[in-house]
Amino acid sequence: MGFSVHGILAGALAGLVVGSAAWADDAARRLESGLAAAPSATQFLTDRCAALKLASPPVIRAMREREDRPASAEVRELLHVAADVKLGYRRVVLACGSHALSEAENWYVPERLDAGMNRILETTEIPFGTVVKPLKFHRRLLKAEPLDGAVTVLRITALLETGQGVPFSLVVEDYSRELAGR
C-alpha cells in the first residue's frame, strides 16, 4: 500500500473542515444555552466579557447605527400592534471594551415603555436590556440558528415580554464567535 502526500493532505483538510463545522455547532449550542440561562442578553454579555477578561470593568455599550427599518407585518403581529402604531427601531453593536460581541436589531413598542426609558434609548449607549429591566421581562426564544460565519456563530430571534406576558420588543441578535471560547 502506498500513501500519497496529496491523499494525506486532502484527508487532513477534510478533517479540519468537519472539525471546524463541529466546533461551530458546539460553540452555537454553548452560547444558546448560556443565553437561555441568563436573565437577559445584556447580563450574559457582561458575564462573558468578565469571564474572558475582555475589559475591566466589563461594561456593555450599545453603539447605535443610525438607520430606520420598517417593521414587517410578521413583526407587528408578534408585538400585537396594528399597522398604524409607531414602533421604535434600534440597530446596535454591543461591545465590551474594544470587542464587538453582538449585533442586534430591535423593534419595540415605545408606548409600552415609560418616557424615561424611551429617552435613554434615544440618547445613550445603554443596552436595551438594562434600560427595560424594571419591566421584569423575560425572553421567549422564537428561533436559534447556528451560523458558519468567520465572525458570528449564532443568530437568536426572541420576543421580550413583560412580567405580565405583554410583548414589547422583538430582537434579532448575531453573536460573535469570540464569545464561545478561549
Image (cartoon, helix red, strand yellow):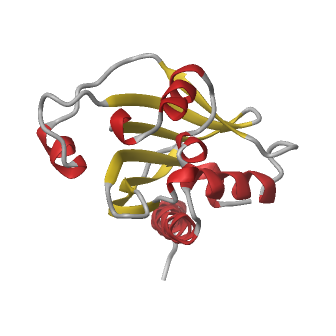
Q: Work out which residue is located at the far top of the displayed protein and give it.
A: 66
Say if residue 108 shows up in the picture.
Answer: no
- Residue 146: percent from left, percent from top: 40, 59
Note whether 127 is above or below 177 in the view shown.
Answer: above
99 or 172: nearer the viewer: 172
Q: Is residue 131 left or right of residue 46?
A: left
Q: Work out which residue is located at the far front of the displayed protein and give it.
A: 115
Q: Is residue 27 left or right of residue 104?
A: right
Q: Work out which residue is located at the far bottom of the displayed protein and give it.
A: 1
- Residue 74: percent from left, percent from top: 15, 45
Note whether 60 is above or below 158 in the view shown.
Answer: above
Q: Is residue 33 left or right of residue 44?
A: left
Q: Is residue 82 left or right of residue 56?
A: left
Note whether 26 is above or below 72 in the view shown.
Answer: below
- Residue 182: percent from left, percent from top: 74, 59
Q: Work out which residue is located at the far right of the displayed protein and give it.
A: 56
Note whether 84 is above or below 50 in the view shown.
Answer: above
Who's the residue at 53% across and 24% down the image?
119
179 or 43: nearer the viewer: 43
Who's the residue at 72% across and 58% down the image?
47
Who's the residue at 57% across and 20% down the image?
123
